[in-house]
Amino acid sequence: MRQTLVLNASFEPLSTVSLRRAVVLVMQDKAVIEQEHAGLRIRAANVEMAVPRIIRLCRYVRVPFRQRAPWSRRGVLVRDRHRCAYCGRRATTVDHVLPRSRGGADSWLNTVAACAADNHRKADRTPQEAGMQLLTQPFEPTPADALLLALALGGRDRGREQAPEWLAVPAA
């Protein structure tokens, strides 16, 4: 099922909702469509509308301030765009820069996406000990950036639609 990004009235990302929920919000005039899926339409007895990709709420919703994006393996893979931090090939695993056996934590700054071969080759060592170099440095995304990356709106990969320039996540 398609996910739709929900923006606050101030254009800040809030969350994602199902396509069904997005259509209901638009039909109830609680939200407007900011970006639609190209060529896709929803048809009903009395209504025809574009399939929303990004919607914006008409009224501002106050949300508690969230300082940090929660860490997850999927989040690390999405942050690094499924590219190995050591060789640049497709990544399927998460590697700890400082291994967990040496006190390395599950955190944004200690984990990178890695292909299985490089993860196995590095094993229980630091990249310096294994003679490997990181192509990209790990970073901690903001909660809004993590949301946009998870929706593939900030990516530059082939086959993915681009977000409007006012919403896109800068390349890391």
Image (spheres, helix red, strand yellow):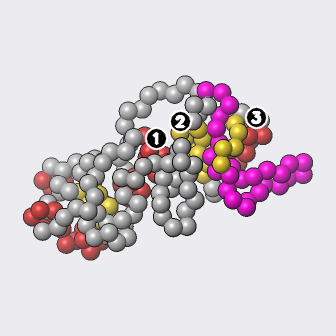
| Outermost bottom residue | 117
Give residue 56's quadrant in the image: top right
Pick the residue in front: 152 or 163: 163
Of the numbered discs 3 and 1, the one sitting upstream in the chain is: 3
Residue with the most extreme right position: 46
In the drawing, what numbered circle is on residue 29?
A: 3
| Dominant SS in magenta | strand
Q: Residues within 10 Å of mark 3 (few under 14, many from 20)?
A: few
* Place of residue 82 in the rendered image (x, y in percent of width and height, measured from the top left): 39, 63
The mark found on residue 144 in the picture is 1
Foreground tag (3 vs 2): 2
Sequence order check, earlier mark of 3 and 2: 2
- The answer for how far apart the CA atoms under marks 3 and 2 are is 19 Å
Badge 2 local density, few (<14 within 10 Å), some, or many (20+)? Answer: few
Q: Position of residue 163 (x, y in %)?
A: 56, 51
Q: Residue type at mark 1?
A: Ala
Which span of residues is magenta-colored?
A: 36-60
**112 and 159: which one is in front?**
159
Query: Label 2, on which residue?
Result: 12
Disc 3, SS:
loop
Q: Residue at x 46, y 41 (%)?
A: 144
Q: Is residue 21 left or right of residue 153?
A: right
Specify the quadrant of the image occupied by residue 62.
top right
